[in-house]
Every structure is written in C-alpha cells, then in structure tokens.
Amino acid sequence: MGKYYDHEQVEKKWQARWEEAGIFKAEDGGDKPKFYGLVEFPYPSGAGMHVGHIKAYSSIDVISRKRRMQGYNVLFPMGFDSFGLPAENYAIKTGTHPAVITRKNIEHFTDQLKAVGFSFDWDRNLATSDPDYYKWTQWIFLKLFEKGLVFRANTLVNYCPHCKVVLSNEDSQGGKCDVCHSDVVQKEKSVWYLRITDYADKLLEGLDTVDFPENVKQQEVNWIGRSEGAFVDFKLKDIDEKLEIYTTRCDTLFGVTFMVMAPEHPLIDKYKDRLSNFDEVEKYREECAKKTEFERTQLVKEKTGVKLSGISAINPVDGKEIPIFIADYVMMGYGTGAIMAVPAHDQRDWEFAKKFGADIIPVIEGGNIEEEAYSGDGNMINSGFLNGLTNKKDSIAKMLEYLEDKGIGKKGVQYKMKDWAFNRQRYWGEPIPLIHCEKCGVVGVPYEELPLTLPDVKNFEPGEDGNSPLAKIDSFVNCKCPKCGGAAKRETDTMPQWAGSSWYFLRFCDPKNDKALADEAKLKYWMPVDWYNGGMEHVTRHLIYSRFWHRFLYDIGVVNTPEPYAKRSYQGLILGPDGEKMSKSKGNVVDPMDIVQQYGADTLKLYVLFMGDYGAATPWSENGVKGCKRFIDRFATLADIVDKKPGDTSLESSLHKMIKKVSEDIEQMKFNTAIAAMMSFMNEVSANGSITKDELAVFIKLLSPFAPHICEELWEQIGGEGLVSCAKWPEFDPAKTVDQTIEIAVQINGKLRATIEIDKDESKDGAIAKAKEAISDKLTGNVVKEIYVPGKIVNIVMK
RNA sequence: GCAGGUGUGGCGGAAUGGCAGACGCAGCAGACUCAAAAUCUGCCGUAGGCAACUACAUGUGGGUUCAAGUCCCACCACCUGCACCA
C-alpha cells in the first residue's frame, strides 16, 4: 500500500499527449451539440497566477471536460486582457516597454496555465493588446460613434490624482480608484462618454431572459437604479426663468417649503449679479469642490448650505414664494441638479429645514414630524385638490395629470447609472480612433485605416498637463482630416481597460479573422456563451459593459442574440489560511505553482473545488490539500486490486449512486459534494478490497474532469481505449440506485427510538408491525396515530 | 437607509419537511518501525454512565406540523454591494 506515483512526470506526460492529439480543439460546426464555456480571461500581471484564478477556471474546466465526454462540441478558450495600467506603471519605473513586459508576462501565464492542465483550446488564444485584436475594438468604437452613442462633454468627472486619469463611475466605486485604491476627486474636465444610459432599460429587460444568480441580477438592477418620477418647473420670482427639478413624489408639492440646488448648478452663475451674498456662495462652492467623493457622500454629517439672497421661486400649485438654497447634499449628476424640498416627508430635507429654520408642512397624515420626516402612506392633507386621497399611486397620478395639463411638469425616468467616461490619459490602451478637424469637427478614422496602432514611445509618463504620452508624438498627432483633407489632429487619449474585454467572447468564435470581428456563421453557431463563470467584483463593471456592447452589436445586426451570456455563475474568494483576504502585505498569499510542484495539479484542482461551497469565501488549508493528495494517492493504487474477488457485485449499487450524484452535482456546481461522494466510494472500495475492471473504468471517468492526469494514467494501466478525456460519460441505471432492503428510522412522538431493516416495498401494516416489535418495551401509552413514509420513517404518536 | 446573503462540532463544510453533523481536516488510541515520518485500522457534538442508554444540541424567542437546521412571524449578530439618488 501507499504506492506513490510521480505526479510531475505523469502530469507532463499527459499534457503532452493531449496537445499531440489536439483533443481540446473546438470545431466550428458539425452534428454534435455545441457548448461554449467561458471564464474571465486574466490580466497578465507580473506576479503570475493566483489561487483565485485556479478556482475560477477549474469549475468550467470540469464542466467542459464533462460536456466533451457527453458528446458535445466544446469551445473553452483562454486569452489575455493585456492592456492596462500596471504594465504601464511598471514601464515608467523600469523603462521597459509595456509591450515587452506584457509579452513576457503572457508567456509566463501561459506556461503556468498549461502546467495546471486546463482543457483550453490554445489555438484560439488572443491578447487584447494585439493590433489584430484591437483593430476590432476600434471598429466597434467607430460604430458606436457613427450611431451617436459617443459624445464629448465638459462635466464633473471622477479623477484619480495618483494614476492621473479620469475614471468612470464603475471604476471609482466607493470613492476609491479601482487600480490604486486612492481617493478619487471630482474634477471638471472635458471627456468622451459612451451613452450607456440609452441602454439602461434594455440592460434591465435583458436580465429577465438570462440564467444569472439572483444576487447578480439584483446588484445590476441596483446599479442601474431606475426610478420613475416627474420633472417639474418652478418659476423664479421676478425673473423670466424656470428651475427644473426631478422628484419621485410630485404629490407632495403642497408641502414644498424651500428648494435646493447643487453647488455646481449653472443658474447660480447666470444670476450672480442678483445675488447679494455671492461672495458667501462662492466660498461655499469652493469648499465643496475641495471635498473628495468620500467626504461628500460617505460621512454622515450635518447638512451644510447657503441661502441665495436675491432670488426665490414660486410654488406652481399654490403660488407661494419659497427660498432657494445651495447645498452639497444635492448632486449635480443626478436628476436636474435641483430639488424641491419637502421637509415633512424627506429625512434629508427635514434635517436641512431644522438647521436652517425652514417651515415643515405635513401633507401626508401619519408619523410624528416633530421628531423625523414621515415617509409612510396616509391621507393627503393641506394639499388642495389632492386632499382625501389615501394612496400614493392615486395622488401621484392626479398631480401628474394636473402638471401636464398646466404644461409645467411631465413624467420622467432617472437612472443612478451614469454614462461611461471612456477616455484615459494613458499610453497602454487602444488609441481612440477619432480626429479633430477645425473645419469638420470630430471625424472618425476611416475603417480601412484600422488598426490605428499605438506609436512607439520612449517616455510613458503621463503629461503634467493631463494629456496622454501620445500627445507628445507629433508624427502621431498631426494628420489629415479624412473628410476635407485639411490639417487635423488625432485624439491622443486611449480607451479604458474594460474596452477589450467587452467583446472578447465574440473573437474566440473566430480569432484570426481579418475581414470582420468574427465570421457571421461562426458567431451564429457558437453564441451565446452557454456558461460564463467569473467574480462578483465584475458584476457592475465588466458584466454591465460587455452586455451593453453586445446589445449594441445586436441592434446593428452584427450578432444574433440580444444577450451574450445564457448562464452566469461566480466563485467565492479563497482567503488566506488566517481567514483574511490574501494580500502581499499580510504575507498570507499561497502560490498555486508551489502546490502544483509539491502535490500536483490534480490535487490543486481537486482541493479548490472540494474546500467548500463553490460560491462562498473559504480559507485556505494546507492540511486540506494533503487530504486531497491522500485521496488521489489511494485512487492511484486501484489498478492493483482489480478483480481481486472475481464475480463480486457488492459495489454495484454504490457505483450507480455515485454516477448519479457526481453527474447531478457537477451541473449545480456542487463540486464539494461530488468529490465527497467519490471519496466515500473510495472508502467502500478499500473496505471491499476488490473492484471489477468495468467498475474502475466508470470511477476513472467520473473523476477524470477533476483529476485528469492521474485518471489518464490509470486508464492506460487498465487498458482503456484511447484517452479517458474522450471516453463516454457513464450513465446510471435508476433501478440500481435503489436498494431492495433499506434501513429506516422508528420514532415515538418524533424522537428516534430504533432503526429497522425492511424491504423497500414493505406495506404500511408490515412496516408498522416490525417497528412496534423493535420498540415494544417503549410502547407504554395509547397509540394515537401511526405514520409510515415509505423509504423514510415510521412514527408512532402516543399519549 | 436600500438591496442581497449567512448563522450547524475544535476547523472547512453535508443534509428533496423524515435517523443532524456526509466527506475532509485537526485530535485521540492502536498496528507497522530501534525510532520518527509516511501509511493502515478504530474512536471522535456536549453532559451523565463501565455499558447498553438517557438528556441536551443547528444565532435568540415564538408558531405551523405526527415530524423543523429546513416552512411562517419577530428579533440578534455578521458578511457583500449600493448609498444625502430627491
């Protein structure tokens, strides 16, 4: 016993055989049903693979391997998301060109991925920084531009002072830069936007058609943040001007006692001459501008603001004059940047009113507005024609009707999601294919000139003026306008990290095509992705962005399905052995390649799938790895006991139960229980001391998606035909998963008192008679009820 | 505040309303060994008992049911995401 196999030698041997036989290559068509399994391709960082990558890829690897054995034509590709800031920052530090670093890192990553033995189709490998690839990223951008979904605006944007780049909302969640985690500031800047908000409703509707986990859908719904309300115009007193606000509760209009504008609201500058306290206003605005996003939104703090003296507004429903304030609790980026304040029924307005001494007029009965704002339902009061209405749906509808009638308000929809700030003032990204011409305005680079390649640069430092390093390359900047032929200048900013990953799954369908982003027939054949696994951290970033681009490509007829991913799943984090998130500074990082070297790739993959619930965060345990290694070592010896007891059929029922359990659990990503079932079977085989060759063949097949190398080795040892990776997935016989004689529990009043062995088809009377016999000494009271659930339990209810 | 989720041994975790704790780890005992490691075998929720057994146990408190970790109500704790979003 305890025979060891040399995992390093075995794993290298079978990796070579697989490559030789080309068994993981996908065919673009054919009679087999197709399966497109996808995992999030990595950013090829210098640090190499993380154990998190192994967990993320192992799930779809197991599923893809099972699908191949089930007779599917499987596409399971891998590539590299190779543009991005880390390579550029490293280049600035060392002077090495990002392309050189990236190439090196990709080679390193590829070697590592191959050493783990994932069943990727390496022929379809791609890198987003390859001009043959980003040609098509630029092509899609030009299509977006052509359709009016690209625009430039001068607004407040998220800016990372450390990375010196503009960030999208998705890139600055929680007020922190996605790359360096430093505080993001708000800065006024002219930037390129993609109109993702035009697709907000389509992105919401699409969620109903796909198989995503509920929490993933909820998070997207939340992020998009659709709200229905109304835009209402408030006239300014003595000025021919109106202040437009957005509200979800237009029915509380009679309770408005003041208005609030965001400090950046343009009306302030327009009427600054009328403001007797403009100095005070200016001072407040400067203070606000200095605050970081974090200070302005995260800290629960006292309301601040300044009353505008010199201008006021008129409440459109009762003609009352109401004061206007500026305060930073109102955001310029949401709604119209101005609100009507109803302190009786909105807590923020209530706090502001208390501090600044504004009136609080209740219009909905209920609560105690002396203590806090009341936001529940109730009778409308103090509200003219709305008085007496009892639910908000009716009162909103009636008020809307009134406002529309008077031409001072209309229904409106708002989203929390903002348009996608799309340009980065950096070198290592796709050049934005636009040209600025004084005569013609902004013109797209002609399609036939794509790819617009990144010029070679020596200095990667972003310019102090906030321009990308490309702005310093005159030969790149200066060009001819494609429209008028006059002198023009190129856009010098590049696209964000997320551009290349927003469509890479399409390129995998046809990665070498130079006529189109992918061949139409191939796209039609492979898309949608059948199963996409990735991290929760990408739900409101990559997942939203790629769904947006794909939906756009659907709308212009490039792809056949509105949604790119039919099914989405996610893996839970692997924590350090101390239960903390792995990080270099904590020194709790586990290098997967150390595990491969010491215990083997089979053990590593088996362990990351066995360690716990696949979707949950689980701490790493080196002892747990050893446990999996022990199992594989025991499994490796099974060929020695084949047919030790000729004609033995004692394992048959367990075998069929295992086939059922493993087959079903893989589909639900319950890898931990699938592996547990195989460990149990292994224990039974050990106890039995013998296994038939056919039974072992089935066992090898079931384990092969998880531990493919040792399974190939054993398959060869027992003389299996071809490669086990290409063998047929075993089927179970339902009849054989049921035992003829079963053990069931006997309870008195729901408490276990005995167990009995009976035939699975035992009659009720027979079962109860046997049960009573087993517990005869305890049958002391009056039997009130006798319950028999076949195959489960007998319960005797006594008084 | 809003949304989603989780709570089970010393640990990771199993349980279509039907014998709670599968499987693995750790621990304990034994075998092998001069010895250790490795390996193999057995035990392993808590309390009481030599034992067979008994009582108590799935965050807390109620409820439904012959039967609840599982379903319902209330609460507590923790995690994740969003957040002065009007």
Image: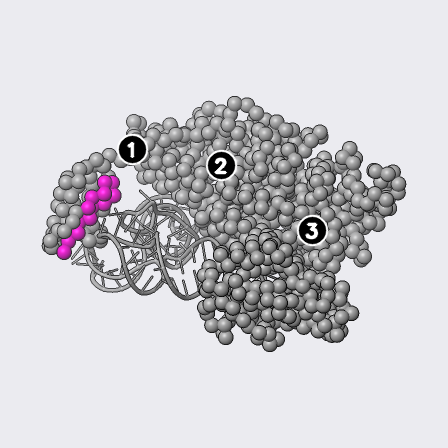
- Tell me the residue at 34%/33% (across/down): A656
Which quadrant is the N terminus of chain A positioned in? top left
Name the residue that disc number 2 marks: A63
Name the residue that disc number 1 marks: A650
Q: Chain of mark 1?
A: A
Q: Amino acid at mark 3?
A: Ala
Q: Between B56 and A201, which is closer to the camera in this rendering?
A: A201
Which percent across, then down, holds residue A287? Answer: 70, 70
Q: Chain of mark 3?
A: A
Estimate the spatial distance between the alpha carbons at disc 1 and disc 3, rounded to whole Å. Answer: 66 Å
> Residue A189, relative to residue A543: is it above or below?
below
Residue A798 included in the magenta stretch of the image? yes
> Residue A253, relative to residue A666: is it above or below?
below
Q: Are marks 2 and 3 on the same chain?
A: yes
Q: Which residues are magenta?
A: A787-799
Sequence order check, earlier mark of 2 and 1: 2
